[in-house]
Image (cartoon, rainbow, N blue to C red):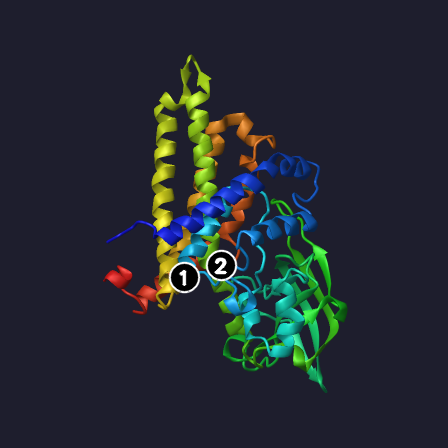
């Protein structure tokens, strides 16, 4: 059993690591300063400039098919790249991406929505969560009723990432209430902001914030249906599933960065005439953090490997998401404790990560939903203890 990276995987990872250290990390002090002043860490033009620099190195559209100018990387390589991105808190991501379900679009829709999104000319958001339908996505209420060649959308979506900046939304709405969303009663629509929906900023404990999207008699042409009528819930679950290994991959990068900060601090900070790293309490926090970090790493890489093998990834990715999200919260908490009062200030990024990673246990599948999926798979015999090695 070989746990080493291939030459290609190592080369890609090292190139990304070099780019992050050379082009992105030098911006960290300015990002912290701006965020302390309640300003965005990066504006859109700065993000685009960084993305274009990365494009010159060939990093464009990590998951985007080659026919659209992307790299179409396997899941394991994407996981490794997301880990490298986690090493910095600068809100950078590689360009050339589009929501994975946009590839279900018609040729006309691809010209109007997909291609401009890949090129960074348009910004999208995905809207399924509602005030009464978070983890229970099948309970959505936003309605779409047919009116000639159009559909009329009424209702509200909430906690929508990117909803404040998007110029179009992928909206999952109820088109047949009797069937229910899970059984073919929901449909996905491509809805331009110019069609009449509005967004309202939601302040959170993290930087930036999601949005509520308000639809009040918004008229959408029938041609703007994404996929087929009744396919909305299936597309929604496909969209959410993508995050089940990218989120904990990012968490691993954060944990690596903060753990190194803790080690450096423990080797330099002195109290009572000795380095704090000589104290058993500090040693145990570092040891526990490293152990949990490694356990998360292999759970997450296993879930990405499962995707690449064409196997059903849901069980493995739920375990990776559950453990990876919990791990990074525990590691950041220990690192903040090791830094004492300075860790609690906004002079260091530790408290920022502390707020950021708390979301990882909630969005794109809460801890509780992951536990439900894992236990249900075992209780119903969908999988065996030990997975593919059983």
Which residue does the numbered mark 1 point to in the structure image? Answer: 372
Tag on residue 243? Answer: 2
In the image, 48 versus 218, the foreground residue is 48
Where is residue 374 shown, x and y percent of the image? 37, 61
* Residue at 44 percent of width and 54 percent of height: 79
**As drawn, 127 above or below 273:** below
Q: Is residue 12 left or right of 124 when viewed as pictured?
A: left
Q: Height in image: 28 above or below 191?
A: above
Q: CA distance from mark 2 to mark 1?
A: 17 Å
Residue 240: x and y in percent read 51, 63
Q: Answer with left or right where residue 331 lies relative to residue 302.
A: right
- Tell me the SS state at disc 1: helix
In the rendered image, residue 197, in percent from the top left (x then y), is placed at: 73, 67
Q: Secondary structure at mark 2?
A: helix
The one nearer the camera, 208 or 58, is 58
Q: Position of residue 126 (x, y in %)?
A: 60, 64
Question: Mark 2 vs mark 1: which is more N-terminal?
Answer: 2
């Amino acid at each position: 059993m070989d746990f080493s990276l291939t030459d290609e995987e190592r080369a890609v990872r090292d190139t990304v690591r070099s780019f992050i250290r050379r082009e992105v990390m030098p911006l960290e002090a300015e990002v912290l300063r701006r965020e302390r002043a309640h300003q965005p860490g990066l504006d859109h033009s700065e993000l685009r400039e960084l993305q274009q620099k990365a494009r010159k190195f060939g990093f464009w559209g990590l998951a985007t098919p080659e026919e659209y100018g992307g790299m179409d990387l396997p899941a394991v390589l994407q996981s490794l790249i997301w880990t490298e991105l986690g090493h910095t808190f600068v809100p950078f991501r590689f360009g050339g991406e589009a929501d994975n379900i946009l590839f279900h679009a018609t040729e006309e829709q691809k010209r109007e929505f997909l291609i401009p999104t890949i090129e960074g000319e348009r910004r999208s958001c995905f809207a399924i969560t509602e005030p009464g339908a978070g983890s229970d996505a099948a309970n959505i209420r936003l309605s779409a009723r047919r009116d000639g060649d159009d559909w009329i959308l009424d209702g509200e979506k909430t906690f929508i990432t990117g909803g404040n900046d998007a110029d179009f939304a992928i909206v999952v709405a109820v088109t047949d209430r009797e069937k229910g969303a899970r059984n073919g009663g929901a449909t996905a629509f491509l809805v331009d902001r110019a069609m009449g929906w509005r967004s309202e900023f939601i302040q959170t404990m993290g930087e930036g914030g999601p949005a509520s999207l308000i639809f009040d008699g918004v008229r959408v042409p029938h041609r703007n249906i994404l996929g087929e009528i009744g396919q909305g819930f299936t597309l929604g679950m496909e969209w959410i599933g993508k995050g089940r290994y990218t989120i904990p991959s990012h968490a691993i990068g954060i944990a690596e960065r903060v753990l190194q900060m803790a080690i450096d601090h423990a080797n330099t900070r002195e109290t009572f005439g000795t380095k704090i790293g000589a104290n058993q309490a500090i040693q145990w926090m570092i040891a526990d953090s490293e152990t949990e970090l490694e356990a998360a790493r292999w759970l997450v890489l296993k879930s990405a490997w499962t995707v690449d093998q064409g196997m059903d990834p849901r069980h493995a990715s739920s375990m990776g998401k559950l453990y990876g999200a919990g791990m990074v919260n525990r590691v950041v908490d220990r690192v903040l404790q090791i830094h004492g009062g300075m860790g609690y200030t906004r002079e260091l990024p530790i408290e920022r990560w502390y707020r950021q990673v708390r979301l990882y246990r909630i969005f794109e599948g809460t801890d509780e939903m992951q536990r439900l999926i894992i236990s249900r798979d075992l209780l119903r015999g969908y999988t065996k203890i030990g997975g593919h090695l059983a």
